[in-house]
Every structure is written in structure tokens, then in C-alpha cells.
């Protein structure tokens, strides 16, 4: 069943990261060449929110350009810009103008292993707010809502409290009675008052949690992002599966999408599959075309898919000539294993479709189920597989 609304706070300047956030907003710092916020949105959208609002302030145009009106799985992303920077509490005033219902709220600089917990448990409350709590170990740099305990389900402050706020909340719509457009902090000003008035519940989740607010934490997540993700994936060969294989295809005019492909991709998205292309592109190594032209073609493919409110999540390709004996050319499994690590992909729930023996061998070496592309609509074939 689809949830209603979620919001993500992405307006902060990330001052603790120094020069790293002078040009790039903190949630858009890249992990494995993908914005941190992109991973977070994938995790959030697995809960089938109708809309996910990004509440922006600092360098808001970056967020609008990358995420506004995009769809992640079944959730539409909408960017909202604060007229003036009013801290976390004032930022919610923008959301107040858009919805009048209960909603989830997430910090845009932290990540819980959401795919291994059930945040819908937060909805089971008669309080105005229910907060997901995590252990406060190693978070001496974070002084917002730490040293918390749970007593009779209520959050209380305690010197011996071992929990801290994880930045994942469920709000009843009554919270908007406390939200004004003036500048104030949700964590430092409003929540402590509501906690003391016993209007805030808490649930402890014993799962991995981290934020990227300091350089040490950021470096850790850059090396360990896969530990926080768990997705199923449809790996697709390109030529012969997605488009007609007419030999070294790189021109848009020669790119003919096969029957049922767009419908198949849209269907896979509705079933919460990542879609990743794994393709050998020896035409680059042979000098027939360059990487820039290859990427331009994939930009065109996603443009066509975006018109149908869907898209391909990532592309891993080998640009080498077969004689180079590289490590990434199929049937070698390097591209698949790299994608598995970077995206936190569950091998036992994923599969690959290809049209060559090299595809099958690559899948076998990667321990991924394999299916040859059939001479039928890709949509019909994938429906049977899933």
C-alpha cells in the first residue's frame, strides 16, 4: 500500500566539511560517482511514497536540476525552495503550504539501513511525533538530541541515555500547528519542548547508521556505502536486448529500441528493481566512436524513457579493444561485481538478460541468474521471470 508523503531536509551548508561544501551542497557530495542523496532517495522510495519533497535552500538550483519532478521507483520527487534560510524548523513551513496530512521526515545527510528496517512502525503512535533512534556511540561531534532514553515509549532526556536522534521522523499533521515561517531549529528549539511535554515517542532501531557531517564519517561512507543498501537488480545487456544490434551502434539515428523494452523497464521499476546496463563497447577501443558519443547515446535513451516516467539507473561498460586483455570485458565479471558493491545489490534476488554466450558466462561467474533474450517482447519475458 502506498504511503502518502515524505520530506527530506537538504538546505544546510555543511560547514563542518569545510571546503568540500563551498561548491557542492553536502547531500550532493558524490559516493562512487553518485550523489549521496541519490542513494538516500532510492532507499526512501522503496516505501512507495506518493511524493517526496526536497526542502532546499543552499545552492537550491543544484537540487532542482538533478531531482525535480523525477521518479524513483513509484515516488515523484518535488523540490521546494525556502524564500529565506530559516533553519530546519522554518524550512518545514514550505511543506505546510503543500500538504495537510501525516508525513515522514528525513535528514538529507544521514543514512539508515532503511531496507533492513520497517519505518512504518513509526506510524503506530498516538503522539505528535515518533522518532527513529540509534546508538550515540562515536557521535561526540553531534550535539542535537543526544543522551536520550525511552520510558513508557516516550523519549526523555537523561545523562545516561544511550540513544540519539537518527534524523528519521514520523509527524502527525498536528505538527504544523507548531510550525511558523520564522527561523528556528527543529532539533534545538521545538523538539526539546515537545519531548518535555511528552508529545514525542521513540523507537530504537539496531541497524547501521551514519551521517556525512564530518570528513571522517564521509570517508567511511565512501568506502562502505554498500553496507547500507540492499536492492534487487535487473542487469541488461544493451545491443540485442534493449536495441536492435546492427553492429557498433553509437548514432542516435541508428538506435532502434526493441518491442516491449520501455514497458518492461517501467514494470521492473514498479517491482522495485534497479536497472543496470552491462555492455562491451569495443567500438570505442577500435576507434569507431569515443566515450563522449557513447554517453550521449545513453543520455538520449534515458530521455526517451523519462518521457514514459521511467529510467535506467546506471551503465557499466568496457571501452577496450578485445586484444587489450582488460579486466572488465565480458565474459569477465568485473563490471557486474563492481555494480553489486557500489549499489549494495542482492545477488540471490537479481538476474541478467543477454543475447550472447559471453553474457551467460559473465552472469555465471557473478553468481547471478541468467536468461537469454527471447524472440518476443521484453516485457512479456520479464513478466514471466519476475
Image: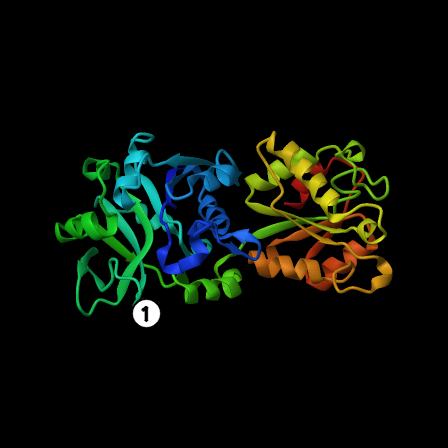
Along the viewing direction, whichever of 338 and 286 lies nearer the viewer: 286
Q: The N terminus is located in which quarter?
A: top left
Residue 236 x, y percent position in the rendering = 70, 47
Q: In the shown orientation, is residue 6 left or right of residue 73? A: left
Residue occupying image coordinates x 83% and y 49%:
283
Residue 168 x, y percent position in the rendering = 34, 51
Number of callouts: 1
Residue occupying image coordinates x 39% and y 52%:
118
Q: In the shown orientation, is residue 222 left or right of residue 302? A: left
- Note whether residue 297 is visible: yes
Residue occupying image coordinates x 26% and y 43%:
89
Residue 328 x, y percent position in the rendering = 74, 61
Along the viewing direction, whichever of 293 and 139 lies nearer the viewer: 293
Residue occupying image coordinates x 57% and y 57%:
32
SS category of the residue bearing label 1: loop
Q: Is residue 62 above or below residue 137?
A: above
Q: In the shown orientation, is residue 130 left or right of residue 115? A: left
- Note whether residue 74 is visible: no
Q: In which quarter of the image is residue 338?
A: bottom right
Reading the image, the residue beneath label 1 is 137
Q: In which quarter of the image is residue 184?
A: top left
Q: In the shown orientation, is residue 340 left or right of residue 162? A: right
Amino acid at each position: 500500500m502506498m504511503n502518502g508523503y515524505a520530506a527530506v531536509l537538504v538546505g544546510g551548508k555543511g560547514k563542518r566539511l569545510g571546503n568540500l561544501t563551498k561548491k557542492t551542497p553536502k547531500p550532493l557530495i558524490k559516493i562512487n560517482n553518485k550523489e549521496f542523496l541519490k542513494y538516500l532517495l532510492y532507499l526512501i522510495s522503496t516505501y512507495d511514497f506518493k511524493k517526496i519533497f526536497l526542502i532546499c535552500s543552499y545552492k537550491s538550483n543544484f537540487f532542482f536540476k538533478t531531482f525535480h519532478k523525477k521518479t524513483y521507483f513509484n515516488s515523484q520527487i518535488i523540490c521546494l525552495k525556502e524564500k529565506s534560510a530559516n533553519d530546519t524548523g522554518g524550512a518545514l513551513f514550505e511543506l505546510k503550504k503543500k500538504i495537510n496530512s501525516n508525513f515522514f521526515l528525513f535528514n538529507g545527510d544521514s543514512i539508515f539501513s532503511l531496507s533492513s528496517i520497517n519505518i512504518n512502525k513509526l506510524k503506530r503512535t498516538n503522539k505528535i511525533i515518533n522518532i527513529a533512534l540509534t546508538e550515540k556511540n562515536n557521535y561526540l561531534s553531534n550535539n542535537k538530541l543526544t543522551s536520550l532514553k525511552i520510558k513508557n515509549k516516550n523519549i526523555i532526556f537523561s545523562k545516561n541515555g544511550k540513544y540519539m536522534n537518527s534524523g528519521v521522523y514520523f509527524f502527525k499533521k498536528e505538527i504544523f500547528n507548531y510550525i511558523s515561517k520564522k527561523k528556528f531549529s527543529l532539533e534545538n528549539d521545538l523538539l526539546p519542548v515537545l519531548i518535555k511535554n511528552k508529545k514525542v515517542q521513540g523507537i530504537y532501531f539496531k541497524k547501521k547508521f551514519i551521517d556525512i557531517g564530518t570528513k571522517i564519517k564521509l570517508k567511511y561512507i565512501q568506502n562502505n556505502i554498500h553496507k547500507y543498501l540492499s536492492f534487487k537488480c535487473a542487469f541488461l545487456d544493451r545491443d540485442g536486448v534493449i536495441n536492435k544490434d546492427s553492429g557498433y551502434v553509437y548514432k542516435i539515428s541508428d538506435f532502434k529500441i526493441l518491442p516491449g523494452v520501455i514497458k518492461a523497464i517501467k514494470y521492473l521499476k514498479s517491482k522495485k528493481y534497479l536497472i543496470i546496463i552491462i555492455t562491451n563497447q569495443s567500438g570505442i577501443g577500435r576507434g569507431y566512436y569515443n566515450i563522449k558519443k557513447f554517453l550521449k547515446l545513453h543520455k538520449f535513451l534515458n530521455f526517451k524513457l523519462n518521457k514514459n516516467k521511467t529510467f535506467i539507473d546506471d551503465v557499466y561498460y568496457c571501452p577496450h579493444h578485445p586484444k587489450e586483455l582488460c579486466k572488465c570485458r565480458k565474459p569477465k565479471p568485473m563490471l557486474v561485481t563492481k555494480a553489486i558493491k557500489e549499489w549494495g545489490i542482492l545477488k540471490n534476488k537479481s538476474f541478467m538478460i543477454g543475447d550472447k554466450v559471453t553474457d551467460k558466462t559473465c552472469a555465471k561467474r557473478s553468481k547471478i541468474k541468467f536468461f537469454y533474450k527471447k524472440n518476443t517482447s521484453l516485457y512479456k519475458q520479464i513478466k514471466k521471470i519476475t
